Image (spheres, rainbow, N blue to C red):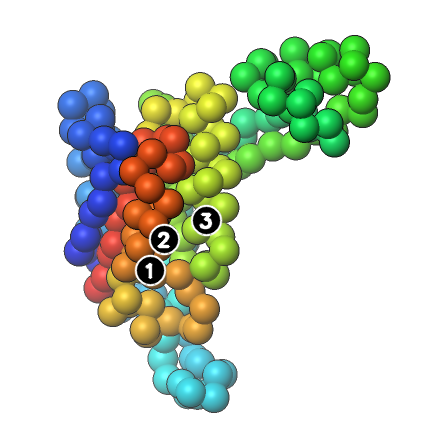
């Protein structure tokens, strides 16, 4: 695979180039090591492409997982407690998970445990490889990366997406770089308030 396009939101790429250049190099190497043709294993059952051999998200994810794990990137969770009281959430959001629970209980509310999970985290950089539906990308950018950033677990998030030229050779409904870049820019320069890098890849 190859990186075709990249977009730096809130200087995400610049941060990596200055502070973690070795991690940026690793991400580039991992993408380049993915053999695109070996991932073209899914026989389409959809009417418009029935019988056509498509790129398999499962195979591509398997390839990325093996390579990130081999370089000591690992899954990580960030935990927090929520409740139904909006003012209480605003007041406790910046606290540690333990403090959140205590404050919610002290206010006579029910604390509900929740967490976000990211597959690849290393040295305060999180990477999500997304070959799923459109809604998953928004969740990654506006919830997962944000939660890790607000929780002081990461300094930058990276989202790897297929370019349209790759997405066209996958099952319908998969998000693609050009569309998600538009969605991100439409939100404005400061939203979401976390440094990000969008990467568009193709065979």
Residue placed most toward the observer, 163 or 83: 83
To which residue does mark 2 refer?
Answer: 183
Q: Residue at x 83, y 17 (%)?
A: 108
> Circles 1 and 2: CB distance less than 8 Å?
yes
98 relative to 124 in the view: left or right: right
- Residue 38 place in picture, x, y as percent: 30, 66
- Residue 130 place in picture, x, y as percent: 40, 53
> Circles 2 and 3: CB distance less than 8 Å?
yes
To which residue does mark 1 refer?
Answer: 179
Query: Could you say whether the residue bearing mark 2 is in a helix, strand or loop?
Result: helix
To which residue does mark 3 refer?
Answer: 138
Residue placed most toward the observer, 95 or 44: 95
Q: Is residue 45 above or below residue 140?
A: below
Q: Is residue 157 above or below residue 169?
A: above
Query: How far, Cα to Cα, is label 2 from label 3?
Result: 9 Å
Q: Earlier in the sequence, mark 2 or mark 3?
A: 3
């Amino acid at each position: 695979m190859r990186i075709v396009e990249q977009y730096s939101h809130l200087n995400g790429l610049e941060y990596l180039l200055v502070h973690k250049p070795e991690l940026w190099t690793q991400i580039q190497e991992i993408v380049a090591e993915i053999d695109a043709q070996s991932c073209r294993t899914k026989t389409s059952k959809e009417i418009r492409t029935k019988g056509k051999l498509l790129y398999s998200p499962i195979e591509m994810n398997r390839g990325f997982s093996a390579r990130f794990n081999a370089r000591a990137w690992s899954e990580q969770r960030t935990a927090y407690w929520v409740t139904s009281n909006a003012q209480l959430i605003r007041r406790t959001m910046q606290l540690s998970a333990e403090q959140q629970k205590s404050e919610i209980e002290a206010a006579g509310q029910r604390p509900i445990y929740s967490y976000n999970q990211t597959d690849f985290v290393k040295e305060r950089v999180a990477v999500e490889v997304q070959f799923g539906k459109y809604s998953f990308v928004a969740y990654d950018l506006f919830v997962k990366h944000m939660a890790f950033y607000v929780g002081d677990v990461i300094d930058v998030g990276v989202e790897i997406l297929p370019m349209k030229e790759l997405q066209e050779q996958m099952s319908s409904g998969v998000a693609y770089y050009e569309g998600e870049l538009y969605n991100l820019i439409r939100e404005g320069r400061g939203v979401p308030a976390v440094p990000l890098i969008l990467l568009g890849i193709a065979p």
